[in-house]
Image (tube, rainbow, N blue to C red):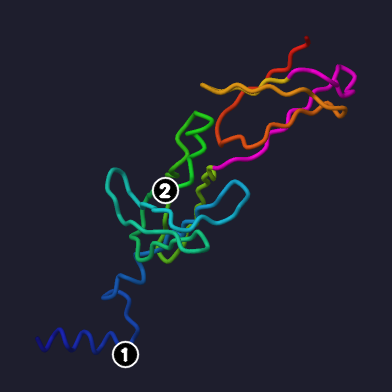
């Protein structure tokens, strides 16, 4: 008991780091979750992991950020769970999953930052422009917007554009046909 007290007292006087590995072996992982336009997404659940092992969970703040602190140095990944009203890019466009990032190497006393992007669900406008081979707008052409179970048609206006309103977030095709 007296030896331990003497070691602590000795360390307090010299600023000894060998007894306090916290300051030398740990770093931090700063995570930001954003929309495609860069706006922050608050309330997203984020998971810090190494290999198959979860290291910590958190939720993004109003700035779309969460800081995992006191993380041992090593190789990490971060995964985001899209909150209600948001989708992963690969949910719409397919391809490689976009809800995680990996191979983040954390060194002692360092902070590494990573950003993950989600897409806001909702409705918007889709505008298709049709031009001829010389780049002039084509007027009165039939343009179809389609997806699984959805098909709607518009005619191009004097500027060669056809606008589709209240289009839900998703992956669509557009085809213009000459009548």
Where on the picture, by quarter, is residue 141?
Answer: top right
- The foreground one among 135 and 159 is 159
**Rendered-image quadrant of the C terminus:** top right
56 sits to left or right of 31: left
Query: Which sits earlier in the primary sequence, circle 1 or circle 2?
Result: 1
Q: Nearer the viewer, mark 1 or mark 2?
A: 2
What is the secondary structure assignment of the residue under circle 2? strand
Q: Position of residue 134 (x, y in %)?
A: 90, 19
Closest to the observer: 127 or 119?
A: 127
Q: Residue at x 47, y 31 (%)?
A: 96
Q: Residue at x 80, y 24 (%)?
A: 156
For the stretch drawn in magenta, what is the main secondary structure? loop
Most foreground residue, 53 or 86: 86
Residue 71 badge: none
How far is disc 1 from disc 2 in space, using C-alphas? 44 Å
Q: In which quarter of the view is residue 44 placed?
A: bottom left
Q: Give the quarter of the image for residue 160.
A: top right
Which region shows up in magenta?
122-142
Label 1: which secondary element: helix
Q: List the residue tagged with mark 1.
A: 13
Mark 2 = which residue? Answer: 80
> What's the residue at 22%, 85% (across, down)?
8
Counting from the top left corner in percent of width and height, residue 60 is at: 44, 59
């Amino acid at each position: 008991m007296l030896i331990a007290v003497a070691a602590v007292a000795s360390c307090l006087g010299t600023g000894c780091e060998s007894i306090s590995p916290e300051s030398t072996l740990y770093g931090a992982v700063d995570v930001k979750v954003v929309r495609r336009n860069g706006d922050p997404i608050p309330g997203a659940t984020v998971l810090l992991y190494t290999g198959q092992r979860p290291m910590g969970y958190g939720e993004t703040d109003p700035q779309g950020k969460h800081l995992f602190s006191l993380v041992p140095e090593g190789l990490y990944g971060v995964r985001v769970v899209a909150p209600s009203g948001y989708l992963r890019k690969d949910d719409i466009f397919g391809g490689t999953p976009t809800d995680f990032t990996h191979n983040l190497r954390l060194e002692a006393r360092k902070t590494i930052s990573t950003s993950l992007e989600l897409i806001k669900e909702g409705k918007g406008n889709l505008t298709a422009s049709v031009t001829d081979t010389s780049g002039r707008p084509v007027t009165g052409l039939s343009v179809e917007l389609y997806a699984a179970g959805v098909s709607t048609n518009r005619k191009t206006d004097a500027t060669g554009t056809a606008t589709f309103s209240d289009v839900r977030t998703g992956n669509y095709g557009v085809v213009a046909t000459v009548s």
